[in-house]
Amino acid sequence: QVQLVESGGGLVQFGGSLRLSCLASGKPFIFNLYTMGWYRQAPGQQRELVADIAPVGSKSYADSVKGRFTISRHYGEDTIYLDMNDLKPDDTAVYYCNARPDYGDQFWGRGTQVTVRG
C-alpha cells in the first residue's frame, strides 16, 4: 500500500509564503522511479498540475506559478516539497501530492488546504 501524506498547508496573507511537504511510503514503492508532482483544485474548478519533478530532477511548472513556486525532492527521505512565495488569493485551493510512474498506477495524497487572504 502506497501512501502520500501532505502537510504544511494553512492560512496566509497576500504576498506570504508557505512550504508544502509530501512524504511517500509503502511497499512496493521505489521513490526514485516516480515523477512526483503537486496538483491543486479550487472550489468549482478542475484539478490542475502545479509543478512536477522527474526522477532525474527535471522540473515543470504551470505558467501561473512560474517564478513564485519551487518544487524539490529529497531522495534520502522520499519527500517532495513545494515552496510557495508571493502567494495570491488565486492560489487558494486544496493541494494534492501525486506519484506517477512511467508505467502502472499513479497515487494521490488526501490533500492539504491552502488559503490566501487578500
Image (cartoon, rainbow, N blue to C red):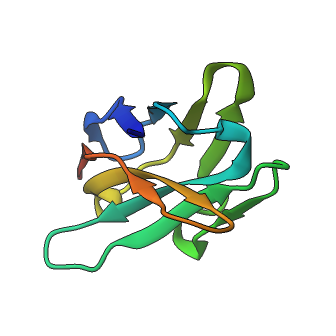
Give residue 1's quadrant in the image: top left
Whole-percent x and y of residue 65? Answer: 55, 62
Closer to us: 117 or 75: 75
| Side of 47 relative to 68 (left or right) | left
What residue is shown at x 36% (from left), y 33% (from top)? Answer: 5
Give residue 7's quadrant in the image: top left
Whole-percent x and y of residue 22? Answer: 46, 34
| Side of 33 relative to 51 (left or right) | right
What residue is shown at x 49% (from left), y 47% (from top)? Answer: 86
Reply above or below: 109 against 102. above
Closer to us: 72 or 108: 108
What residue is shown at x 49% (from left), y 63% (from top)? Answer: 105
Whole-percent x and y of residue 28? Answer: 54, 38
Residue farthest to the left, as pictured: 44
- How many tags in the picture? 0
Reply above or below: 21 against 92. above
